[in-house]
């Protein structure tokens, strides 16, 4: 596994107390107007990735995990990969309406669920979550075809189903979190709030994120949210999929981090400046780029899968930001559509591609902050 490191030549700086040492230039960015359209933006301190003590770029090679040319199971549209306590991996395929079990080397073990409407069947699985409840562990599956969350044991034996009205038929934008046995979170871009805590009776407990595109305007997919919650540490991070800004909640305050301040918003196919720039439904639908593809925490930082890179942002600004780019073992740049963090591993997936790549997270964490 090869790692190449280099410093961002134009914007690396170190700040210690009142001493600012300029290494190779320094670029400051003012708070842009568009972030003021983000609901509650006045409560957030504005920063960019260049507000930290440097930006380090690393290029890392990843290993092939699943090869459709050699496998007895052909996957199509992978929507989630989950490492289970049994030491196997569950893979949700949206197109086929299946959940498969794979072993550690990417070989299929069995079909856990297949498409249907009877007991033990599933509709359109898009996200999975493993939850430990006392001495027992369960797996929950968000199903946008049957508008439900399916609860199973580790063997795939169905326990119960929870039906919800506000489960939008969206893919590549869903993420299920189980906070406790009766509290769930998932994005619902067609409804307001677009991210909320709900109980098993479909009752709204708490709204977490509001719409950024008003009801009745397009592109409504700008309301789609990626997020991560760690209630024990009181951490919450989120971002609209099509807007290059991470919103971070910590005990000591709230911060918004502009992930790509050097690029004009129009180049990223979004603008939030003026209401009259939004599109009426009769004018058609605008395209939304999926910029933010995953968010997760480690002990000292928040990670954001942004476009085809992965950004590690320390909680302390005294440490540098790391931006990781990926290649396959033959040196080809890895372009992924979805990144799934499960257990202590990362999986890189392209839609309708025949290969899935894997990388242990400790490979990245070994790069000392």
Image (cartoon, helix red, strand yellow):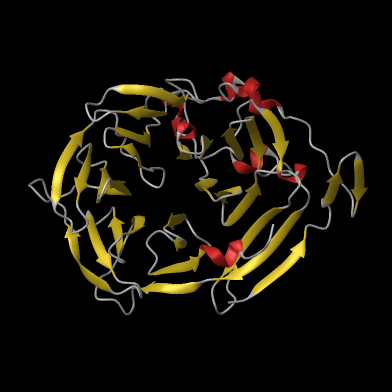
Number of numbered discs present? 0
Camera-nearest residue between 216 and 47:
47
224 sits left or right of 271 in the view? left
Q: Is residue 150 above or below residue 164?
A: below
Q: Residue at x 53, y 45 (%)?
A: 292
158 sits left or right of 138 in the view? left
Q: Residue at x 51, y 40 (%)?
A: 241
Camera sees residue 253: yes
Q: Residue at x 30, y 48 (%)?
A: 132
Question: Residue 222 location, x and y as percent?
Answer: 49, 33
Camera sees residue 128: no
164 sits left or right of 208 in the view? left
Q: Quadrant of residue 174 in the image?
A: top left
Q: Quadrant of residue 2 in the image?
A: bottom right
Q: Is residue 121 above or below residue 89?
A: above
The residue sitting at the front extreme is 135
């Amino acid at each position: 596994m090869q790692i190449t490191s280099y410093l961002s030549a134009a914007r690396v700086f170190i700040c210690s107390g009142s001493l600012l040492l300029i290494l190779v230039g320094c670029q400051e960015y003012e708070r842009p107007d568009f972030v003021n359209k983000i609901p509650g933006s006045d409560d957030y301190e504005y920063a960019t990735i260049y507000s930290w003590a440097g930006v380090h770029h690393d290029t890392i090679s990843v290993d092939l995990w699943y090869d459709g040319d050699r496998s007895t199971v052909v996957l199509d549209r992978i929507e989630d990969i989950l490492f289970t306590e049994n030491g196997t991996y569950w893979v949700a395929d949206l197109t086929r309406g299946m959940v498969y079990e794979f072993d550690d080397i990417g070989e299929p073990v069995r079909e856990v669920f297949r498409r249907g409407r009877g007991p033990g069947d599933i509709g359109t699985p898009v996200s999975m979550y493993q939850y430990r409840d006392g001495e027992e562990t369960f797996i929950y599956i968000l199903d946008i075809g049957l508008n439900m969350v399916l609860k199973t044991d580790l063997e795939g034996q169905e326990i119960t189903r929870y039906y919800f009205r506000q489960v939008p038929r969206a893919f590549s934008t869903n993420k299920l979190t189980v906070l406790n046995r009766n509290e769930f979170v998932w994005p619902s871009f067609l409804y307001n709030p677009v991210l909320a805590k709900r109980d098993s009776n479909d009752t709204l407990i708490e709204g977490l994120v509001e719409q950024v595109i008003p009801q009745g305007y397009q592109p409504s997919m700008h309301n789609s949210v990626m997020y991560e919650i760690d209630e024990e540490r009181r951490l919450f991070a989120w971002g609209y999929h099509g807007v290059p800004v991470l919103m971070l909640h910590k005990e000591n305050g709230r911060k918004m981090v502009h992930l790509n301040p050097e690029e004009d918003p129009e180049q990223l196919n979004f603008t939030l400046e003026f209401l009259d720039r939004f599109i009426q439904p009769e004018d058609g639908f605008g395209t939304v780029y999926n910029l933010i593809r995953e968010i997760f925490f480690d002990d000292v930082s928040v990670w954001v899968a942004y476009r085809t890179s992965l950004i590690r942002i320390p909680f302390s600004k005294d440490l540098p930001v790391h931006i990781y780019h990926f290649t396959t073992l033959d040196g080809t740049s890895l372009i992924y559509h979805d990144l799934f963090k499960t257990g202590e591993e990362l999986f890189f997936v392209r839609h309708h591609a025949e290969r899935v790549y894997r990388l242990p997270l400790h490979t990245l964490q070994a790069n000392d902050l």
